[in-house]
Image: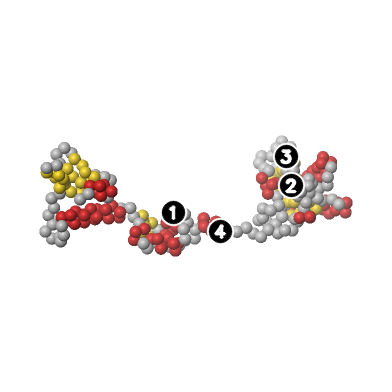
């Protein structure tokens, strides 16, 4: 019997000074004793009820031990458990794997609950409208598109009683200015001050003010309508649950 083959199967020779034995290297469990005579190692076997040579008996014992060790490595769990462990593999694929006796997988149940992570990974983005884009919203020049967002109420108030702030960001240059106000309607009305300052500072006209659909910008609509006859700005409100227009103001 080749000692090299025994080592590859996970067994090793141990000697305590008085006797020798073949044991598993993993836990030291003795498989059988070994004797030496004339510098030759041998094993005494008695197999009255077994057919075959002593070599066959020894190999049968070793094979059984190896099978028992493999059985200890079987993974047990539910179908959903292995679905998660295998990188959210499809339920059908996990079941096909578990049906193979050599897979080392034993399923305790085959329930198929909805996986939140898989559902989130399959989400799609809503179709983006092309309204208020292109020539109607010239983002390639300063003042072409100004994005605005209102934040608040903030607690506590500042010493002047302000609880809201509104920011205005130029889409082309990323120039940003922030105003404080005590109420929502007064915060949105700060656009009139920003428009006058921005047009004087950059010597240009603001073409589009892009905001969300908040009702606080209603007075801005009135201001834009009153000045449209003079080729002033217009307000474009974004659709709900889309990140298209004013993402830069949300980050400010």
Check contact, mark 3 vs mark 2: CB within 8 A.
Answer: no
Q: Inspect this view and state whether residue 156 appears.
A: yes
Q: Is residue 222 left or right of residue 65?
A: right
For the point 88% across and 51% down, which residue is it?
A: 230
Q: Secondary structure at mark 4?
A: loop
Q: Secondary structure at mark 3?
A: loop
| Cα separation between marks 2 and 4 | 32 Å
Dots 4 and 3: beta carbons under 8 Å? Answer: no
Residue at image location 24% in from the left, 53% down from the top: 65
Q: Which residue is mark 4?
A: 122
Mark 1 or mark 4: name the one nearer the start of the chain.
1
Tag nearer the camera, 4 or 3: 4
Mark 2 surroundings within 10 Å by alpha-carbon count, few (fewer than 14), some (14 through 19), many (20 or more): many
The residue under label 2 is 171
Secondary element type, mark 1: helix
Cα separation between marks 1 and 3: 54 Å
Image x and y of residue 213, in percent = 72, 54
Task: Determine which residue is flagged by label 1.
Answer: 85
Q: Identify which residue is drawn at 70% across, 57% down.
A: 239
Q: CA distance from mark 1 to mark 4?
A: 19 Å
- Mark 3 vs mark 2: in front: 2
- Who is closer to the viewer here, 143 or 53? 53
The residue indicated by pointer 3 is 161
Residue found farthest to the top: 159
């Amino acid at each position: 019997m080749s000692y090299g083959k025994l080592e590859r199967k996970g067994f090793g020779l141990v000697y305590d000074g008085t006797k020798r034995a073949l044991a598993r290297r993993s836990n030291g469990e003795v498989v059988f004793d070994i004797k030496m005579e004339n510098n030759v190692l041998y094993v005494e076997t008695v197999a009255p009820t077994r057919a075959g040579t002593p070599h066959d008996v020894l190999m049968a014992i070793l094979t059984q031990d190896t099978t028992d060790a493999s059985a200890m490595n079987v993974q047990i769990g539910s179908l959903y458990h292995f679905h998660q462990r295998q990188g959210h593999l499809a339920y059908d694929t996990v079941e096909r794997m578990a049906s193979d006796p050599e897979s080392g997988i034993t399923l305790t149940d085959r329930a198929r609950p909805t996986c939140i992570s898989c559902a989130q990974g399959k989400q799609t983005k809503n179709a983006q409208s092309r309204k208020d884009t292109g020539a109607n919203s010239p983002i390639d020049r300063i003042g072409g598109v100004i994005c605005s967002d209102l934040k608040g109420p903030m607690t506590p108030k500042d010493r002047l009683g302000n609880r809201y702030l509104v920011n205005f960001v130029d889409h082309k240059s990323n120039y940003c200015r922030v105003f404080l106000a005590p109420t929502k309607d007064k915060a949105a009305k700060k656009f009139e001050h920003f428009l006058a300052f921005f047009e004087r500072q950059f010597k240009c006209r603001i073409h589009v003010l892009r905001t969300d659909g908040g009702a606080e910008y209603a007075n801005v609509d009135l201001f834009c309508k009153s000045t449209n006859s003079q080729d002033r700005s217009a307000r474009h409100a974004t659709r709900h649950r889309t990140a298209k227009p004013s993402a830069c103001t949300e980050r400010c």
